[in-house]
Amino acid sequence: MKEWLKKYWKTLNRPSVHFSLGFLTLGGFIAGIIFWGGFNTAMEYTNTQQFCTGCHEMRDNVYAELKETIHYSNRSGVRAKCSDCHVPHDWTYKMARKMAASKEVWGKIFGTINTREKFLENRRRLAEHEWSRLKANNSRECRNCHEFDYMDFTRQSKRASEMHSTALASGEKTCIDCHKGIAHELPDMSGVEGW
Amino acid sequence: MKQLILLASIVLSMSLGMNTQADIDQGHIANARGNTSVASSSKPPAMPPVVNTDIKQKRDYPMQPPLIPHKTDHYQVDANANKCMACHSRRQTEESQAPMVSVTHYMDRDGNFLAEVSPRRYFCNQCHVTQTNAKPLMENTFVDMDTLLEQSLKEKSQ
């Protein structure tokens, strides 16, 4: 193993004999574009609705519920797809979330929620993951569209503007504290703060 | 005799059926389809928006379940969660400033007070409803108790 590593280190450490510097830099640059582009394209593919609903776990449970809500079906035709809320848009946070999401591949392989019953059993646990994620990042994914500074309180209902101009404005509460279960059905809420 | 009754009932039912059909055709009797023929489909009326003013409405009689003055779209009320109670339960009213559900909702049928809303009062929409600005299909001639009392007092004094 050590010998093998040494051999490779020697090859890498020695200047190129057969290829010109221009070929190597340009070739490296082009290869970099292809790999980087390919990587991002593949990652973007995992952000599509088609990918998310490719498995029955998502299609028959959470996606079916989303279809009835305002985030999917509304007058203005703006639609939030899975990744708009569940994957950060910022690259650094997105990478972190994608790495964390590799656990979901494990779940898929071992069938953690591969029946409706298993899904319902796990719903509270899964929901709590999302609640705590959004609580910790101050509902960042909500704010990608619902920017606080852009809100016109005069166009909101009395109740909404009262809540938003006090609790939300002061930072005492964040979106997810009150708006749980807006895109999917709620699990058993006993013991959850505010329920 | 039996035959006569049978004949009479057949004639009666036929004439009843004919009358009903004729009335529907002339628009005398409103049914769900209106005057639309069976083979065609009518354009559904536009859905009126729900009143969302957050202003309490007067009750027409003391026992009337209060009307909901706000939208309740997609409020989940089932075994897992009760969205209404996230504001209207005793615990939440200070924060939400929403009216607390009346104490009768905490009573079981024997009049014992429970810690949580009684299961028989759990499903809010059984009694409490939102309102729309839709024009009523039929004129409402309801007169409330106060008006009746005033009328009777007037009649007495006359």
Image: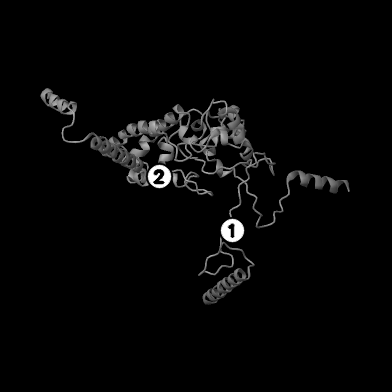
Is A48 or A103 nearer to us in this picture? A48
Reply above or below: B27 against B155: below
Residue in the image at 34% along x and 31% along y: A100
Taking depth in this image into account, of B24 and B61 the one nearest to the observer is B24
x%, y% of residue A107? Answer: 29, 36
Reply above or below: B90 against A111. Answer: above
Quarter where residue A66 is shown: top left
Marker disc for residue A142: none
Q: Is the residue marked by circle 1 packed among few (<14), some (14-19), or many (20+) residues within 10 Å?
A: few
Q: Quadrant of the N terminus of chain B?
A: bottom right
Please tell me which residue is depicted at 44% across the width and 40% down the height of the picture: A185
User: In the displayed image of the protein, which residue is found farthest to the right?
Assistant: B158
Amino acid carrying mark 1 in the image = Pro
Q: Is residue A111 visible?
A: no
The answer to which image quadrant residue A86 occupies is top left
- The reply, left or right, for residue B158 in relation to residue B45 is right
Q: Identify the residue at horizontal 53%, vertical 33% (top origin).
A: B86
Front label number (2 vs 1) = 2
Q: What element does badge 2 sit on?
A: helix
The chain under label 2 reads A
Image coords of residue A135 (percent x, y): 46, 28
In three-dimensional space, the C-alpha distance between marks 2 and 1, rounded to whole angstroms, equals 30 Å
Residue B142 spot, x, y in % from top left: 71, 51
- How packed mark 2 is, by other alpha carbons closer than 10 Å (few <14, some 14-19, many 20 or more), is many
Residue ID for mark 1: B45
For label 2, the residue is A63
